[in-house]
């Protein structure tokens, strides 16, 4: 049985799931589903890796570099990776491209799904590596870097497989010409674009990397993975697993390479501008993303910054709503690209099923919910995670100088397991709609603005304007009025921003489920691409049709 | 019965045809298939239109302009069209966008296919309008602007319909959470990007316009059609038919507008750069196409110039091959974007089934075939058509000063029906592979280079280099060696250029059939888009998904 035959049913299910958009996941998000002892074994493996060189990659290097730092331990993790000069990396990639570009689609699909199975066996080790580089709490580290990332990778493989097989590879074309027929033999090939570069970010080193990586690979492009210098280990494990699997199967393992650098000696621009690099995926700042999009003769896929808004119009139960918003704003200390930042409340207050609530009461409910979450020892540290970078911490500590009325300052939160961990509650600042200069930019991390508006129409108007001009990945709205809901949906969809309405319980605006939710629409400045629509795949290859007379 | 129901089977057949790539056309290319008297009626209608204002459009204007010129009559055709200022056009488009963007996909699809049926009723009138603006001969005018264009338009509608319905519009998403389920209602909307602009060219005013026009419309975008000032009437008839049909069906006819200008007062740049214009389709020069692609914040689809090559390696029958190449190079006087320009012959000659042929013999066979075709009164004028522009004629007349060895000068050819017609035989110039400065650019029109190379490997090497650096839409190759054929195909496909092998009989490299052949790959500098791959559609809309908790 070929690897394709082994995984064919899974690929077909994934394609079907992408059409029906019902809940589906081949990789359970509950760690317990992976069996006894797996967690402990992963932790042991991660501990054994610390302070050692990462020797699993099949690529040679001429130096060992690494400067990752655990936000939990407040220590460098001491792992170094083989580093090569860019031209060596490109030369290896060019060589591997010759083979990979000619490897047939079924072989590619089979190998790629099999690689996800290999990665699955290392979910726990990856989870600890993610914790101690990004500062994500354990559960998010496990889910986002493990099953949720594998889901997104499988989604890219499946949509790629679907597209690459959407046109017959061979056709006999017979045109009736009256007295005779004209017959041509035709073939149709999806030609890969060539070397791709996937640039990782410091907060989601796997989840934001594997969609582009697997989309590139399924289309026959070799890939250079350039992780953020502060978040290498999680994706290094993935790259190593792919390399080993490929070697076992007679495929040049240099089809995927890890290209590491350090904060003071970054190689991203040189690689991105290299004439042999045709495709670039990027997650990170708007400034760098705009630069990536501007490099001539590249096909670029970007996820950049944005300002995500919450519109409070009317609610059933303010306590539940405040709790839902507090959770979304606190989760991983607002370091998710999907985290809400601006919360709009009308000055006249909001209606609830238990009567009218004044602006101040609504505001206070929110502040209370954020405080309660952070101060609950069973919740706080496990939701907040840790602050990934010193820059984000400084931004939080300087929040009081941003302007407006500081309702809550970020305060240190104790994580009993990691006494030195960089854990802080969010800062909450009260503004009015006139404070556009403050709220009209992304303040990455745990800073929340509560913005007093004239009414819901003004809340919506600001939200729409920010989405169109600054970009937004999500919009959360609460309303009990169906006309208002429709109006909000229509308005926000016009600026290509999805809306989530009246979330509660275990539903949070931050979560974008593979096989159902698109992640980023590509239609506003928050990014030019979307996990995973057809364009995310089709831009990575070119259809070429040949004709032959016999 | 709705219009969608009326045309549903046709749309489904078109989708299937795009997958299987067998021959299929809903619009027969034989004029006789359209019934007795149709041709004469079309000719009468065209004659009646000459020297009159075109009053079929439902759009108002504040001036009447028009300066089309018949290459056959050597006279202005005297038709004027309503012209409005750009801001009026944009304002109408913005208003129409509100309705069209919300019109459901089935209604859109039904209306658009119905509009093709209306256009079909005017194929002959369009054919004469095409002749007397572009200089195409009658048969090409009929086929390219009539059935072939309708085929391409239907292809865009069908692939659009397929994509827009590829994801469920509504889903109930239920995630098992252990003790309870988490349920969200989701919807998925393909949001149009907004106002589109389709910029026509002077040689194929319908065939190169309707793919972008119908692709825009099926995705819910309104469209401004900006024809070349020398080729308006054919597409004006199409726009008028759409406007009238839309009005009859309660749709704002300003969903499609014609924006006319004059050579001395062109409006293309102002429209293209207008901030409300989101999508641009362009066919024309590389310089202007590069400019269109460079305008920030636009989604651009371009077909630009290229150099199409012919590789002569070995043939069965040199006479048949020379005749095939001569036909392709002479058809519409080389004014097709798919026409071959550079023909490479090894200095050692070529093998044929009747023995070896020297370089000179092969060259002479080609020159003879080109001469024979032009001088055959039953063939010449009907294949050559007329030279569309004075600039192309001058280029032909100055061909002798390009360098190299002028084997054939362009000579006047008599068209007995139109004694003043601008009809000329092609110029043929002999070069060597060293003359890169001459053959490495497009010489639009009836100029053919025969280039002496060291061997087929050098012919291929030059062809590949030109495709990668200058661009190419087609490559024609003749070889009786299957290894050589595979080598040529592999090499040229790497630079995203399709190869046609050993064409003969009624098969010509110029023809790209809808539902089977891609036109332009989008992978080399000849253009960034392809009729009609999925990307040609998917870039015109944005998927947005909303979620709701009940």
Image (spheres, coloured by chain):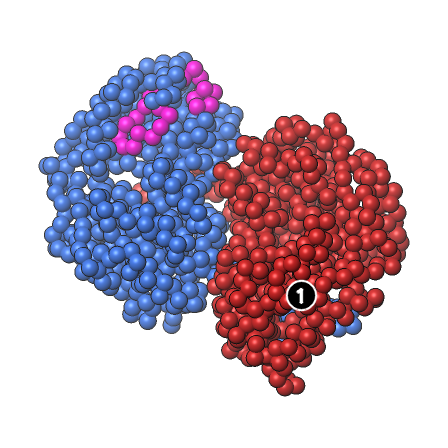
Chain colours: A blue, B red
Magenta run includes residue A120: no
Examine the image and state in which quarter residue B500 appears: bottom right
Write the residue at 47% across / 57% down: A541
The residue sitting at the bottom extreme is: B355
Q: Is residue B142 above or below residue B451?
A: above
Residue B123 falls left or right of residue B204: right
Query: A359 or A266: nearer the eye?
Result: A266
Q: Position of B75 compared to A503: left or right?
A: right
Residue appearing at x 80%, y 67% in the figure: B375
The answer to which image quadrant residue A386 occupies is top left
User: Visible in this render: residue A262?
Assistant: yes
User: In x, y percent, where is residue B503?
Assistant: 65, 71
Residue A41, position in %: x, y?
16, 56
Vertical arrangement, residue B405 with respect to residue B279, above or below: below
User: At which x and y percent is residue B232?
Assistant: 73, 42
Q: Chain of mark 1?
A: B
Residue segment shown in magenta: A439-462
Mark 1: which secondary structure?
Answer: strand
Residue at (31%, 53%) from the top-left corner?
Answer: A225
**Neighbourhood count class around disc 1 (C-alpha, 10 Å): few under 14, some 14–19, many 20 upward:** some
């Amino acid at each position: 049985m070929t690897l394709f035959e082994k995984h064919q049913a899974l690929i077909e299910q994934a394609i079907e799931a992408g059409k029906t958009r019902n809940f589906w996941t081949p990789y359970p998000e509950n760690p317990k589903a992976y069996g006894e002892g797996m967690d402990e074994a992963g932790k042991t493996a991660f501990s054994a890796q610390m302070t050692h060189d990462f020797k699993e990659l099949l690529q040679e290097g001429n130096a060992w570099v690494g400067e990752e730092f655990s936000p939990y331990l407040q220590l460098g993790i001491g792992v170094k990776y083989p580093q090569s000069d860019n031209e060596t990396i490109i030369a290896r990639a060019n060589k591997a491209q010759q083979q990979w570009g000619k490897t047939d689609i079924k072989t590619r699909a089979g190998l790629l799904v099999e690689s996800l199975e290999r990665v699955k066996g290392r979910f726990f080790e990856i989870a600890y590596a993610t914790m101690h580089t990004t500062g994500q709490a354990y559960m998010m580290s496990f889910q986002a870097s493990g099953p949720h990332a594998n889901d997104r990778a499988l989604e890219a493989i499946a949509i790629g497989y679907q597209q690459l097989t959407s046109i017959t590879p061979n056709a006999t074309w017979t045109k009736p010409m009256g007295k005779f027929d004209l017959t041509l033999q035709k073939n149709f090939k999806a030609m890969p674009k060539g070397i791709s570069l996937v640039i990782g970010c410091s907060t989601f080193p796997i989840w934001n990397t594997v969609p582009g990586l697997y989309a590139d690979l399924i289309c026959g492009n070799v890939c250079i993975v350039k992780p953020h210098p502060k978040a290498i280990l999680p994706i290094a494990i993935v790259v190593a697993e792919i390399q080993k699997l490929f070697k076992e199967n007679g495929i040049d393992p240099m089809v995927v390479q890890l290209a590491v650098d350090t904060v003071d000696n970054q190689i991203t621009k040189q690689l991105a501008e290299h004439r042999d690099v045709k495709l670039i995926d990027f997650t990170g700042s708007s400034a760098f993303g705009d630069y990536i999009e501007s490099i001539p003769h590249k096909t670029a896929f970007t996820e950049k910054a944005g300002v995500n808004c919450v519109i409070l119009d009317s609610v059933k139960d303010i306590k539940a709503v405040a709790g839902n918003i507090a959770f979304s704003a606190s989760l991983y200390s607002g370091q998710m690209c999907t985290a809400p930042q601006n919360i709009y409340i009308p000055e006249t207050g909001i209606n609830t099923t238990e009567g009218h609530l004044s602006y101040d009461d609504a505001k206070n409910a929110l502040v209370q919910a954020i405080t309660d979450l952070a101060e609950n020892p069973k919740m706080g540290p496990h939701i907040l995670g840790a602050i990934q970078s010193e820059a984000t911490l400084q931004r939080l500590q300087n929040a009081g100088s941003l302007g407006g009325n500081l309702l809550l300052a970020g305060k240190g939160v104790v994580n009993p397991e990691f006494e030195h961990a960089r854990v802080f509650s969010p800062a909450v600042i009260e503004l009015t709609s006139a404070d556009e200069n403050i709220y009209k930019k992304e303040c990455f991390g745990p800073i929340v603005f509560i913005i007093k508006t004239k009414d819901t129409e003004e809340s919506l108007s600001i939200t729409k304007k920010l989405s169109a001009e600054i970009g937004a990945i999500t919009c959360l709205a609460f309303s009990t009025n169906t006309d208002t809901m429709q109006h909000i949906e229509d308005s926000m969809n016009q600026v290509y921003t999805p809306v989530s309405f009246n979330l509660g319980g275990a539903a949070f605006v931050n979560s974008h489920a593979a096989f159902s939710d698109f992640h980023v629409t590509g239609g506003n400045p928050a990014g030019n691409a979307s996990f995973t629509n057809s364009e995310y795949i089709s831009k990575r290859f070119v259809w070429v049709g040949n004709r032959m007379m016999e």
